[in-house]
Image (cartoon, rainbow, N blue to C red):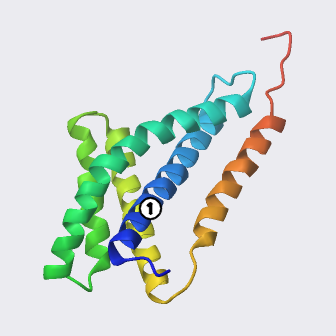
Amino acid sequence: MMKGRGDRKVTRKLSATFLSTLISSTAICSWGLVTDDNIENNLAADFFSWTVIYFLFMGIIVLIYGNIVSVIVESFQRKWFEEADWLYILILGVFGAAIGLILPHWEDIIQGFFVAMLYGLIDKFMLKRWQQNKGTAMLFIVPLAVFVVLSVYFHYTLPTWSFEQ
């Protein structure tokens, strides 16, 4: 059975939400663990738990705010700048940076900007792939595989303890 246009749009938006949130939370947490001077005992547990926390926190924001903004910007794109996907992605980034109105920290503003741009990039990439009747399975497999590989990496790179500390 062929999915309707609305069903595909909802699937695309939810997929972009999941993927942009997973990729961003994995990147933010792995970067945080690698650059942290206060290394704890179990990096794998820290990585997993912080990734889940970031995933849920960012996921709720992207699911509600990000999808509303993307649907509105996409409708404007269809009317005024249909071929300018780069502008759609940039506008989403600007709206993503608006998280600074709630969380006025420059790290949050930058993260919001890039998460929103990643969302827009994935959204448009999936749309183009579906228009060409091509699959998008690799978009899901690669981030999940990276998450598993990083979990295994952090599991086997426990900090070494010495009595001099």
Closer to us: 117 or 77 = 77
Up-down: is 113 above or below 131? above
Q: Quadrant of residue 89?
A: bottom left
Q: Characterize the local packing of mark 1: few (<14), some (14-19) or many (20 or more) Cα atoms within 10 angstroms.
A: many
Q: Does 8 appear above or below 68? A: below
| Secondary element type, mark 1 | helix
Q: Report the residue that reaches farthest toward the bottom.
A: 132
Q: Residue furthest front?
A: 1
Q: Which residue is mark 1?
A: 16
Note whether residue 125 is visible: yes
Image position, residue 142 (x, y; %): 65, 63
The quadrant of the image that shows the C terminus is: top right
The number of discs equals 1
Expressed as whole percent of the image width and height from the top left, the position of residue 6 reads: 33, 71
Q: Position of residue 111 (x, y in %)?
A: 39, 47
What kind of residue is marked 1? Answer: Ala
Of 122 and 31, which appears nearest the observer?
122
Res. 94 in view? no
